[in-house]
Image (tube, rainbow, N blue to C red):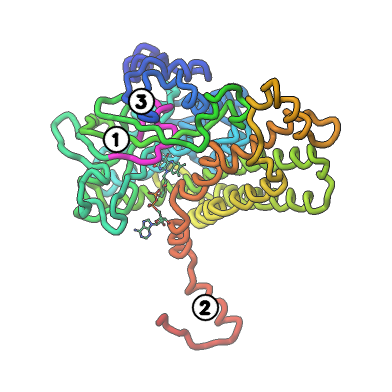
Amino acid sequence: MNQQNVVSLWGSFKTPIVNADDYIASLRGRKMDVFFMGERVEEPVDHPVIFPSINAMAETYRLASARPELASADSNIAGARVNRFLHVPGSSADLVQKHEMQRELGRRTGTCFQRCVGLDAVSACHSVTYDIDAECGTDYHQRFLAFLKRAQQANIVIGGAMTDVKGDRSKGPHQQADPDLFLHVTRRDDKGIYVSGAKMHQTGAINSHWLIFMPTIRMSEGDRDWSVVGAVRVDAPGLTYVVGRQTNDTRIVDGGELDAGNAQFAGQEALIVFEDVFVPHEHVFMDGEWKFASLLVERFTTYHRSSYVCKTGLGDVLIGAAAEAASHNGVEDASHIKDKLVEMTHLNETIYSSCMAGAYRSKPMASGACINDEMLSNVAKHNVTRFPFEIARLAQDIAGGLVVTMPSERDLQNNEVGSLVRKFLQGRPGVDTVDRMRILRLIENMTIGRNAVGYLTESLHGAGSPQAQRIQIARGMQIEDKKSRARLLAGVKTKTEPN
Ligand SMILES: Cc1cc2nc3c(=O)[nH]c(=O)nc-3n(C[C@H](O)[C@H](O)[C@H](O)COP(=O)(O)OP(=O)(O)OC[C@H]3O[C@@H](n4cnc5c(N)ncnc54)[C@H](O)[C@@H]3O)c2cc1C
């Protein structure tokens, strides 16, 4: 496909995107309905609170330029080397490299760099469209491949929109008081479908070029109109974005950058409202095949739960920050501090090992895509729902109370109290007081500030709240097989039936 065709297919922004600067430029000038704190945002790229999240996404392009062996891959879809965030894993080696890339990006940004949901949506759609076609005689897989090939060639960002707002959680989509509480098809014509509803907590939505929307739960026969998968441009008519508030997000506009803790990078989540958004047939990848919704959710979450390996990169940063804080305080050699750093590292590497084990024990599927081991992926994500909280607690323990009581950068610059702050916030001799403050602000940022959204609460709920993993672990734990092994060794001849 030549440059002319790529541009006409993907809009007015400059494609193919080659590097981080191209990516940031590609976000400019789009006509999107974006709101933040009650105000319309005309140009998100120029918004000081939003830009750090764009910069975190841009880091994925910087890594692809700096380390192509890690952050790009050979795609048999485009027949070329493509960004790994647009590559469907075809082997265990692909999944291993994917996870190494995710950890590295976590280290580089200290936050959510926002591209994993889209990658995992692409990966899940690859095999599920193939399987729907095999059973239903549809042509979703070819449509999907054509879409993905263009995305790879243009080197764009695809966001993954799964979580519906869900209303009454005890009821399915068609049982809700308002049909829009789950995204659904409102009408169909010979050109395509129209969808309405909303997707909640959408990571990097405004920083993406396209969105793949997917069902968030198992569907029943009455939910045919809610059983829909498709791709839309983020600037499609009918889409409205309300950017979520993050803790301390406006520190960045308070003056200076020290108080932000991590002034360069942040995550982003938005509520996306769909009002009769048109999706042409070529971008519809499921429409009514309700039985396949649960397969899509399971495959997506299997990929996505292992993608939380990224949090080990954030863990690396936080462990380093805790060690720095201890050093600034002159206690780095104290045995309990060393032990706490060991504990933090043990927890962090436990997450890493379960994610990597799931990649090494991956399985090929009929479509040619390869998927992480389902049990290990659920175990990995379940670890992520807990261990970062303990790592954060230990980081705050080591940091001391100053992590939450420290005067501001403005006080530091004030003629009357600045010298007092410098004098009384000093650590051990030889340590710059401002450096000490910077490290404490980073720990604050990651444990109760803006990037705690990505490090903690996203770790808890992203890719499904803890109970979602426990359900999958219960399904796969093969308890009858385990009981029979126990009976065999104990010499028990009678099999007890479950109560
Ligand atoms: C920072 C962040 C980023 C995210 N990014 C994305 C993204 O990019 N794309 C995306 O699609 N999603 C994203 N998510 C959404 C994430 O997948 C959801 O938060 C998660 O699936 C939980 O859904 P919920 O938040 O609606 O919580 P709820 O469904 O309200 O769950 C709250 C509690 O209720 C329990 N519960 C829920 N339903 C039931 C039920 N029927 N019966 C019994 N108990 C129930 C849950 O187990 C949980 O304990 C993100 C979330 C966060 C926090």
Q: Residues within 10 Å of mark 2 (few under 14, many from 20)?
A: some
The foreground one among 281 and 446 is: 446
The residue wearing badge 2 is 484
- In the rendered image, the vertical position of residue 27 relative to residue 129, given as above or below: above
Q: Please provide the residue range marked out in magenta.
A: 198-212
Give the label, 3 or 1, closer to the camera.
3
Give the label, 3 or 2, closer to the camera.
3
* Mark 3 or mark 1, earlier in chain: 3
Instruction: Residue at the far top: name it.
Output: 4
The residue wearing badge 1 is 273
Q: Which mark is residue 129?
A: none
Residue 477 horizontal/vertical position (percent): 49, 66
Q: Residue at x 81, y 44 (%)?
A: 332
Residue 60 horizontal/vertical position (percent): 54, 28
Q: Which mark is residue 39?
A: 3
The foreground one among 55 and 485 is: 55
Q: Is residue 445 left or right of residue 81?
A: right
- In the rendered image, the vertical position of residue 475 relative to residue 440, given as above or below: below
Q: Is residue 262 left or right of residue 294?
A: right
Residue 72 shows up from this direction: no
